[in-house]
Amino acid sequence: MASEETLQSLAKAITNKPPFCTGTIPVTSEDCTLYYKQGLTSSWLDLTQPTDPQLEELAQACVPATFGRDQEDVLDESYRKAGKMDKSEFAVMFNVEKLSIDERVRKQLFDASHGDRVVKAELYKLNVYGKGSFFKSHKDTPRGEKMFGSLVVVFPTPHEGGALVLRHSDQEWKFDSASLTREHQTPSIAYIAFYSDVDHEVTVVESGYRVTLTYNLFFKSGKEASEALASVGPVAPDDHLLRDALSAALNDPTFFPKGGHLGFGLSFQYPISGEWTREAHRVRCELVNNLKGSDAMIYRVSKQASLATSLGAVYEIQNERDGTAVPVLVPITRVLMNNQYNADDFIEQICGSTHKGLVIHELGKVAPGRNFGNFVEKYKRMVTLAWVTPLTTYSNFVSRFTAYGNESRSSWEYADLCITARVGPYGKRGTLRDRVASGTNHDQRT
């Protein structure tokens, strides 16, 4: 049996790195020269040594900044008060690649699991926060499935306040760009890169002007990435705590002596949906390559331990026969789709050849309803699973479908993403070869 003490040791070994990285870089006047439109004329300024009239003129050339809400751009100065300038309205000499900020972000924010990926920063907009400006807590809207975060560059313009406060998983961090840029003797920019699912806010600017560039962060792919990788070396991961804890558990004969599954709730949010379109399916298939932070570490370390490791979705299916809620694990590539299901045989269909679902018997709890006894015995579609970290609300989605019985009706099920690792019996812990031999990414055994 997997002891509670062992599971706690595994959970404690999952180190959650902060979901952001920061830094400062010395810059020249050339780096910080900004040209912009102002009505029918144009103007420019050097952001390493701007005058107050120049900054005021720049602020007046901006338009009120909007923000995204329910797929719409909203203007509400009680929620966000700032000026913005779209990239078509200005030109700047500042170059992210020249200053190696993209490479710094890759090394600081990621690890060896992304050693073959290259970060691309795409300029999005310029913002000016004057006295009294702010932006209440929000999350950035991902612009494409390959976008993983945002980069904010703060120029060394004198200002007080306007700190960026980040919140994630009940933790809070403060990025005080005013202090960071002021403490350098030579002009320096301050930057911060963070994941898209991180809540963040800009506190009230007390004086001066806070001038920023915002970039959308993507992963490069194809030939562009291959050529860039010539000068990129992988970053050594800090996985030893989880690796040692998992090794100790697998070497313990009392830990899952007959084998079982370890489950991990995800700590980050991913752009996934339950829609059955070619694009949505492609995103689900590629999700394992875009895991973030501790999620990527769990997947990587489990595979290194030769455990069959996969991404899955857990549905709480209502059993029409006895009214019990039954947790069912489905491979991420086989989620419920826009299809028709018989309400009386719903679980049997989910656990069939199309979805390859597995009824979860959570360790330490009574097995799902006895009415499934014959079904489980016949099809071997139940797994014993111990949750190392609980399911979270960061990455859940809805699958919509048609259920029919006495009458046809539209229905839906909520699903939570998770990582599962199958542990073999003591003496034969490795299960990765079993999965390869069976030609499946989702095993069917306990």
Image: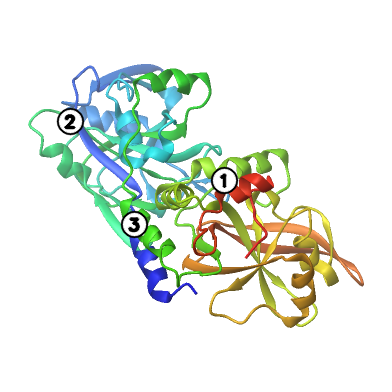
Q: Is residue 92 above or below residue 372?
A: above
State whether residue 231 is above or below residue 118.
Answer: above
Count how many numbered circles sit on residues in the image.
3
Local packing at callout 1 (Cα closer than 10 Å; few below 14, some 14-19, many 20+) is few
Write the residue at 79% across / 75% down: 374
**First along the sequence among labels 3 and 2:** 2
The residue indicated by pointer 1 is 72
Choose mark 3 or mark 1, whichever is in front.
3
Among the two numbered marks 1 and 2 on one chain, the one whose residue lies closer to the N terminus:
1
CA–CA distance in space, label 3 to label 2: 41 Å
Q: Residue at x 40, y 59 (%)?
A: 246
Quadrant for the C terminus, please: bottom right
Q: Quadrant of residue 254?
A: bottom left
Query: Which kind of residue does numbered mark 3 sit on?
Result: Asp
Q: Residue 188 has which mark?
A: 2
Dot 3 falls on a residue whose secondary structure is helix
Q: Name the residue that disc number 3 marks.
A: 244
Q: Is residue 101 above or below residue 19?
A: above
Badge 2 marks a residue whose secondary structure is strand
Q: Position of residue 369 (x, y in %)?
A: 71, 80
Label 2 Cα crowd, 10 Å radius (few <14 / some 14-19 / many 20+): many
Q: Residue at x 32, y 22 (%)?
A: 95
Give the distance between the C-alpha atoms of the residues marked 1 and 2, in whole angstroms.
Answer: 35 Å
180 vs 82, nearest the viewer: 180
Image coloring type = rainbow
Q: Earlier in the sequence, mark 3 or mark 1?
A: 1
